[in-house]
């Protein structure tokens, strides 16, 4: 082993590094120092531009080499297609759809604020139920909830009018006596 270390050491003209041939009092080797002058900073990181990313990193083809790749042709509309379509979710301005029941939402709000809070809130609940039934296409449930909303609106209105008349009568009687 010593002959191998000595022969390699003499060929390269470096001191022997074999542990058997190194003297015990030898100091460990110090790695070479870097130059103390200014060192250039690396260039700043810039992420790849997404539109050109496909040119540098192509997507792998998910097929085996012996199988041919078939691409689906792109859809090209004929000249008879309009450039865009407009979808209308309700009746047009010239038509009136009278088959749908009224939801009485505005009336319910008004009687809740001005007449009776409790029965007005119940009327609001039935008005919302009417809208929900019409939105899901359930006309029978919408008609039933609309009738109940109308009844509660009329009950609230009647209660509010009776309360106002009773208050006026009370004030007139109280002032006259």
Image (tube, rainbow, N blue to C red):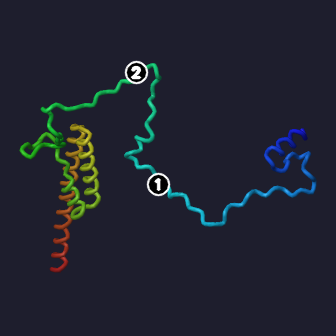
Q: Which residue is mark 2?
A: 68
* Quadrant in which residue 92 is drawn: top left
Count residues near mark 2 (Cα–Cα under 10 Å), then give few for <14, some for 14-19, many for 20+. few
Q: Residue at x 20, y 48 (%)?
A: 103
Location of residue 165 in the rendering, given as x and y in whole percent from the top left corner: 16, 67
Which residue, as the protein is rendered here, is positioned at the far left?
A: 94
Position of residue 157 measured from the top left corner of the image (x, y, whole percent): 18, 58
Label 2 secondary element? loop
Q: Quadrant of residue 26?
A: bottom right
Distance CA(mark 2)–CA(mark 1) = 38 Å
Tell me which residue sits at (26%, 49%) in the image.
126
Q: Residue 133 in the image: state x and y as whole percent.
A: 26, 42
Q: Which residue is mark 1?
A: 46
SS at circle 1: loop
Q: Is residue 62 above or below residue 66?
A: below
State the quadrant of the C terminus.
bottom left
Left or right: where does residue 98 sit relative to residue 8? Answer: left
- Residue 86 in percent (x, y) is at 17, 42
Q: Is residue 75 above or below residue 44?
A: above
**Quadrant including the N terminus:** top right
Nearest to the observer: residue 49 or residue 82: 49
**How many discs mark residues in the rendered view?**
2
The front one of 136 and 53 is 53
């Amino acid at each position: 082993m010593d002959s191998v270390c000595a022969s390699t050491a003499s060929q390269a003209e470096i001191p022997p590094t074999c542990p058997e041939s190194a003297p015990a009092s030898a100091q460990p080797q110090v790695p070479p120092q870097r130059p103390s002058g200014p060192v250039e900073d690396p260039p700043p990181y810039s992420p790849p531009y997404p539109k050109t990313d496909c040119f540098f990193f192509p997507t792998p083809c998910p097929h085996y080499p012996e199988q041919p790749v078939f691409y689906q042709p792109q859809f090209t509309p004929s000249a008879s297609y309009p450039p865009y379509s407009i979808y209308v979710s309700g009746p047009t301005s010239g038509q009136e759809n009278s088959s749908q029941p009224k939801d009485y939402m505005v009336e319910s709000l008004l009687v809740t604020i001005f007449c009776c809070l409790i029965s007005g809130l119940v009327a609001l609940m039935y008005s919302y139920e009417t809208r929900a039934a019409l939105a899901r296409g359930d006309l029978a449930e919408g008609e039933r909830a609309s009738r109940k909303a109308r009844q509660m609106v009329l009950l609230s209105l009647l209660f509010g009018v009776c309360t106002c008349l009773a208050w006026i009568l009370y004030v007139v009687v109280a002032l006259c006596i």
